[in-house]
Each structure stands twice: as structure tokens, then as C-alpha cells.
Amino acid sequence: MTMKSAIIAPLRRTAAGFTLAELLVSVLVVVIITVIASQLMSSAAAIARNGHKHLDTDTQARVVLDRMTLDFAQMVKRTDVDYYVKQKFYKGHGNGHGCGQGHNGDLTSDQIAFYSQVPGYYPSSYGSPISLIAYRVNESTASQDAARYGRLERMSKGLLWNGVSNNTGNGNNVYYPIVFQTGQIDSSCNGNQCPCNGTIGPWANVWSAAICNTNNSSDPDYEIIGPNVFRFEYYYMLKNGRVTGWPWDRFDYPTQQTIYYPAILGLSQVRAIAVSIAVIDPATRALIQQAASANTAYGDILDLAAELPDFKNSCGRGNSQKSIGDLEDEWKGIIESVAQTGQISGGKLIPREAAKGIRVYNRYFDLKIW
């Protein structure tokens, strides 16, 4: 063997392998790359899941608010036509929270009912283009309403022209003619606080579901329009720019009790009705209901709805004056808090992940033709 061959051979043997240190470094690099890739994939999956959740809620909110746009645009706007709208002297403040008192018995979301020139479910060939429209979140705990519980419903009750029928019996199969007179929609309570038992007023049994939300206030003309809308609140923008829970300016009419007494106002001082809704994606809603069914420590969908407060300045004249967007910002802050703590009022719990699937939407419906 020559001197040159003796020198090259050991060098070749040395270059043929890796040291232990080199192998460890290589393994460490591979692990780091794997961890980074895994985190990127997890983040992408989480973003995709949230995107799908938001897509579900965005789609449903758009359907509901577009339907309301049509109903409000065709509202019969007259001072001598009845409305069931949010004001203090109706039961539970429009069947809502009742001046920001939170979950008051079975009262959570607001209700509204009015005449509108949109097609309804007509009882006969004498149907007119006027319908009774109503919105509510179903709060009935009756077994037959289980599929409707905590879901936004819309009533579209087709009416008859005046004098077409004089059948004034009781029951869901009886339909009444349009009478442009106050006290028709709210005939069972006449603007006062009273139980919605359908025993007072000539049309109470037929139309009581438009203003009541109890276990016996079902109506075949209600349909689920927002299956994952669990909170419904509305308030008013007056023509002078004030945002209020009263459908008139309390500085101008400090003694006014309803939109009809002592002065007949109707909604003449209202420029727009603002509607706010909270929507949850289907999978997250199911998570809340499963937790509530399995463990009494967890609240259900309406317990969560009760965390989102009423438009509070409806309790006083100018106190805690709200501005545009205040209510929605307050709701969003509460939802973020629930997502962090998993706790709601009354010591109940909500799965923290569930709050992340909730979004808040708002739209103003102009009544400027008054």
C-alpha cells in the first residue's frame, strides 16, 4: 500500500457515517418541523370551523332580517290601527325582560305584532292582502313545543276584508275580518298587565298567541323562521334622533301611557324600528342543550338568552340614555365573558366553547313615511 492510499482510506471511512450529535440534531429538527406543521394544521382547522359557524349564523340572520324588511316595509301605518309593540304598560314590557330585570319567569325575548300588506295563510277564497304579522322566540316548555323551544317564530295570519264573514266563534279555525280599530290585536289585555289566558276580548282565543308566549299560546299560523335565533330584542329611533325603548318621546308626552292613551299617537313619532338578534350555530346549540339535559348545573338556551339584557332606558325618561350600537356592544361583551368563564347568572354554567358560536346582528327598519 502506498503512502497516498493509506491516507485516503481512513478519510473515506470517516465520511461514510454520522456522529451521534448530528443524528440528535437531525431528529430535533424533524420534531420541530412536525410540531410547527401540526400547529399550523390545527389553526387552519379551527379557523375553518369558525368560518363554517359564522357562515351558518350569517346565512340565517340574513334570511330573518330580509323577511322582516318585507314585513315592516308593508306595515299598515295609521294611528287608528292596532299594534302590539314594546312599551312599559304591556305585560312584561312587550313580553320582554321587563325593564332590564333579566330572566323573569318565562319572559325573555320581546314580541311584536302588527298588520302588514303581505300575503298570509288565508282561511278561504275571500282572503285579502292584509295579514297579522307577529314575531316571538318560543318559550313554551310544553312537550308538543319541544321542537320550537328557544327558536324564532313568525306568524302570518291571513285576514278577511271587513264584513266578509260574521262568524265570531272561538277556536283556531275561526278567522275574523279586519277592523281598523285599536284594541284588536291586544284584545285580551287591552294594554294592561294581565294573564294571557284568552278569556277577555272578542278575539282573544284566536289572536292571543300574537301577544302571549306560554304553554297554551300555540297557533297553527306560526312557523319557525329562525331555528337558531334564540334572542330577539327591538327598540325605536325617534324622529328627533333619540334611541329609546318607548314608541314616543317621553319629554313631549310625559303622561302618555300607551300609543293610544291619552293621545292617539300610533307610531307617528317613530322614525325606525331597530331589531337585534343573537344567532347560534346548530352544533353549538346542540352542545348547550346536551349539557343542560345531562347536568342541572348547566343552563339551557333561554338561560343564555336571559344574559343578554333588555334595552334598559325603557324604564325611565332619559336615564342611562342609549346610543346606536350600545345594546349590541353590551351583548357582545357578555358573550365574550361567558366564553372566558363559562358562567351565567344564578350560578349556572354554559360550555365555554358554546359562546364562541354566537353572533349578534342588528338592522334598522325605516318607518319614515309616517
Image (tube, helix red, strand yellow):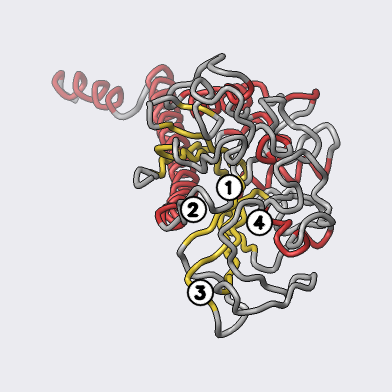
Residue bearing the label numbered 1: 229
Residue at screen point 51% across, 17% down: 321
Residue named by callout 4:
184
- In the rendered image, residue 112, in percent from the top left (x then y), is placed at 59, 48
Q: Find numbered disc 4 in the image and state the secondary structure of the residue it sits on.
A: loop
Among the two numbered marks 2 and 3 on one chain, the one whose residue lies closer to the N terminus: 2
- 133 and 46: which is toward the camera: 133
Between 195 and 22, which is closer to the camera in this rendering? Answer: 195
**Which quarter of the picture shows residue 256?**
top right
For marks 2 and 4, give the CA distance. 26 Å
Q: Nearer the viewer, residue 302 or 255?
A: 255
Q: Nearer the viewer, mark 3 or mark 4?
A: 4
Left or right: 323, with 153 as reference point: left
For the residue carrying disc 2, how many other residues have a C-alpha within 10 Å: few (<14), some (14-19), or many (20+)?
A: some
Is disc 1 in contact with disc 2, using a CB cutoff of under 8 Å?
yes
Relative to residue 227, is residue 298 drawn left or right? right
In space, the residues marked 1 and 3 are separated at their CA atoms by 30 Å
Q: Nearer the N terminus, badge 1 or badge 3? A: 3
Task: Give the image location of residue 138, x and y in percent.
Answer: 70, 51
Label disc, if present, on residue 155 of the rendered structure? none
10 Å crowding of disc 1: few (<14), some (14-19), many (20+): many
Residue 128 image label: 3
Nearest the eye: 243 or 299 = 243
Which label's residue is closer to the chain start, 3 or 4?
3
Residue type beneath disc 2: Val
Distance, label 1 to label 2, CA atoms, is 9 Å
Q: Is residue 52 above or below residue 36?
A: below
Q: Residue at x 24, y 21 (%)?
A: 11
